Image: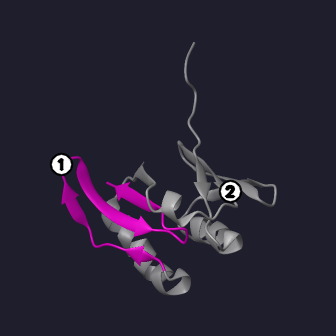
Amino acid sequence: MMFKSLAPFIPSGKDLEGAKQLFQDLGFDKTWDQGDYAGFSKGDCSFILQKYDNKEFAENLMLNVRVSDIDDFLAMVKEKKLTEKFAIRVSPIISQPYGREVNLIDLAGVCWHFVG
């Protein structure tokens, strides 16, 4: 028996449609949409965005996403002006023992660690 995939359920916060658009603008493909739930993937990464607004839960949830080039990732975020478009927070590149990372706080308050 093998584990084949992991797809966490991620809260959308108050603005489900805005969250769907944010993740598409970040480069994820929306693979299906059932209204209150939508599947997203890119390469070997996938998750299910759910209509769920619990600030305490979201602000204590962190995800680690490996990207091929962190400089390109941050440049894309800046080029698309995602901080202005969605009122999200994005850190500069930070060096960590496990790699260089950009922290992105999404619409719900979830911290995404994009690591290259």
Question: Where 63 sits versus 107, above or below?
Answer: above
Q: How far apart are the two marked residues, 1 and 2, measured between alpha carbons? A: 32 Å
Q: Residue at x 23, y 47 (%)?
A: 98
Q: Residue at x 59, y 42 (%)?
A: 7
Q: Residue at x 61, y 68 (%)?
A: 13
Camera-nearest residue between 103 and 24: 103
Count the marks.
2
Give the residue at mark 2: 50
Numbered circle sitting on residue 26: none
Camera-nearest residue between 94 and 51: 51
Q: Which residue extends farthest top? A: 1
Of labels 1 and 2, earlier in sequence is 2
The magenta stretch spans which residues?
88-116
Q: Residues within 10 Å of mark 2 (few under 14, many from 20)?
A: many
Q: Amino acid at mark 2?
A: Gln
Q: Amino acid at mark 1?
A: Pro
Q: Position of residue 83 (x, y in %)?
A: 46, 81
Question: Would you identify the image quadrant in which residue 75 lies?
Answer: bottom left
Q: Position of residue 64 (x, y in %)?
A: 40, 50
- Closer mark to the observer between disc 1 and disc 2: 2
Q: Position of residue 111 (x, y in %)?
A: 42, 61
> Is the C terminus in the top left, top right, bottom left or bottom right quadrant?
bottom left
Give the residue at mark 1: 97
Secondary structure found at label 2: strand
